[in-house]
Image (spheres, rainbow, N blue to C red):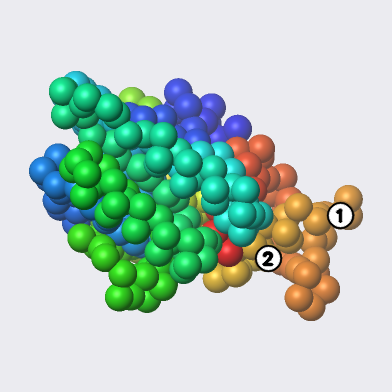
Amino acid sequence: MYCDFFQLQQNPFSQNSPANSVFLPAPHHIALESLTKQVNNSCGAFLLLGTIGVGKSALIKSLIKNHSIKNSNLVFKHLNPNTSLQVSASEPSYMAKIMKSISDSRLPNNETKTKNIFILDNANNFSTPFLNRLLSKITEQNKREQTTSLILIGHPILASQLKGLQIDKSYLLNPFEEAETINYINHRLSYTQYAKQPLFNKQAIHQISKLSKGIPWKINTICSMCLFQASLDRQSIVTQETVNIATEFCLLENDSKSIDCIQNQQTNNICYCAQDQQPAKVINANSALKLNKSALNSLQQSKKLIDTAA
């Protein structure tokens, strides 16, 4: 386990990150501040858009955490927590349950001026007619009393899906720039209380930024693989060569195939990609398909994210 080699108290690049590891670069902070003002001072529907893994959930976590600390009168409610959206988004019974949740939220004699903030994740998986009904429901309730808001979270294609419908404000989160990738990696290391020499040199981070395309969960996966590779080679710092070797066994351009490639490894230490059934390159003699549980779990969780939002 590379944590022992680098003397890390825990895996800094785990996909299951604790609350204190949330990192929001400057543009995300601006979106968070604006969204905070919107839900505090107005009601209606808001869009939070971005590609898979760009940090939408992290921003929402920060939004809820900030209000819970301030003892706000805002009540946040997830309309689709822990559900298989590829199935449930098309089920009439599930959509009816969402509509009922909003209807049941009306607070009679609301003297404390409590406001409900509903959150619908992966909204682009729902049909346009249903989203239209949902937005109409929010508008209808706010005509009686300004107490309801809805945050729709999804892929940028959601904006075109809702074109012409009543949306009060939209926010688009972009992938990290290279400087933000550096800050992100340092942040993830700092919450593990690592304060020694940098683990990645400049060339390595440049390559990580390039391969990950600035997507946080990809950064986590690559960094985890690189630290594991470096520990096998007894290197105290990750170089660009380390990054290339650690990511060489499968192309990161097609993440789901890369993960399938690992999962389908045979006992002869040769793995086959589903596309061409040709042997994939092993990492090196020492690390030939000895990926630790941490790296494999990271890739498996990444695949779940892809499958969920497909």
Identify the amino acid type marked 1: Gln
Percent of width and height locating residue 2: 55, 35
Residue under label 1: 266
| Residue depicted at x 36% and y 34% | 105
Percent of width and height locating residue 256: 64, 62
Q: Is residue 163 above or below residue 96?
A: below
Quadrant of the rendering where the C terminus is positioned: bottom right
Q: Nearer the viewer, residue 171 or 102?
A: 102
Q: Around disc 1, counting alpha carbons within 10 Å, would you say few (fewer than 14), some (14 to 19), or many (20 or more)?
A: few
| Residue depicted at x 80% and y 56% | 264
The number of numbered discs placed on residues in the rendered structure image is 2
Q: CA distance from mark 2 to mark 1?
A: 16 Å
Percent of width and height locating residue 290: 72, 45
Q: Earlier in the sequence, mark 2 or mark 1?
A: 2
Secondary structure, mark 2, is: helix
Using the rendered view, name the quadrant where residue 246 is placed: bottom right
Q: Around disc 2, counting alpha carbons within 10 Å, would you say few (fewer than 14), some (14 to 19), or many (20 or more)?
A: some
Secondary structure, mark 1, is: loop
Q: Is residue 103 left or right of residue 46?
A: right
Percent of width and height locating residue 308: 58, 55
Q: Mark on residue 257? A: 2
Q: Nearer the viewer, residue 266 or 88?
A: 88
